[in-house]
Image: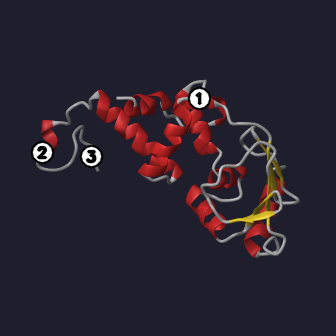
Amino acid sequence: MARKPYPPGVHGKKGRRPQGEFGQQMATKQRVKRIYGVMEKQFKKYFREVKDKPGVTGDLLMQKLEMRLDNVIFRAGFAPSRQTARQLVRHSLFLINGKKINIPSREVKLGDVISVKPSKAKKEYFTRLAAALQEKKGGAPSGWLEVIPGDLTVKVKSKPTRDDLDLHVNAQSIVEFYSR
């Protein structure tokens, strides 16, 4: 199979026009929305909450998205994807500081302890997960979370920094998009 230097279709050889600044900003915003599974209204709300706070607005926005419960479950390694983490949370499988929670968008705070419900910890999914986490020797890939594999708990040690994010996204372009 030969790879051609132009897109398929009738109009492919004409080539694509370079995307403008607005288009790039919009594409970045849409990409981040899809990654975190957030709708436009909620994304705008997050932006409004962080835009007047001191600090780099783009980093604060990404920090806000990272501190969502479904993302923390994903980052801790309790789910293979954010969508799966969201479903696990919706099925009330987790406790935050001992209280049942089923809202994936809930923001976790520093010092929060997220654990699997004791009644659900015996399920096959979590027994396999505990074994897999034990093999990894615990420790979340993110430095801001502390995973205790034996208890299936996660403790939020600090707020995530730009270095903790493995997304290669220019958050500042999202700020510029909303600031026009």
The x and y percentages for residue 178 are: 40, 34
Question: Looking at the image, is 149 positioned above or below residue 23?
Answer: below
| Name of the residue lying farthest toward the right | 150
Quadrant location of the C terminus in the rendered image: top left
Q: CA distance from mark 1 to mark 2?
A: 47 Å
Q: Are marks 1 and 2 in contact (CB under 8 Å)?
A: no
* Foreground residue among 156 and 178: 178
Q: Earlier in the sequence, mark 3 or mark 1?
A: 3
The quadrant in which residue 21 appears is top left
Rendered residue at 60%/61% (across/down):
86
Q: CA distance from mark 2 to mark 3?
A: 18 Å
The x and y percentages for residue 71 are: 63, 51
Residue type of the residue flagged with mark 1: Lys
Q: Earlier in the sequence, mark 1 or mark 2?
A: 2
Q: Is residue 9 visible?
A: yes
Q: Label 1: few (<14), some or many (≥20) within 10 Å?
A: few
Rendered residue at 60%/24% (across/down):
55
For mark 1, give the secondary structure.
loop
Q: Is residue 131 left or right of residue 159?
A: right
The x and y percentages for residue 28 are: 41, 38
Q: Is residue 57 left or right of residue 155?
A: left
Q: Determine which residue is flagged by label 3.
A: 2
For mark 2, give the secondary structure.
loop
Rendered residue at 78%/59% (across/down):
132
Q: Determine which residue is flagged by label 2.
A: 11
Q: Determine which residue is flagged by label 1.
A: 53
Q: Label 3: few (<14), some or many (≥20) within 10 Å?
A: few
For mark 3, give the secondary structure.
loop
Q: CA distance from mark 3 to mark 1?
A: 52 Å
Question: Looking at the image, is 179 positioned above or below residue 127?
Answer: above
Q: Is residue 166 visible?
A: no
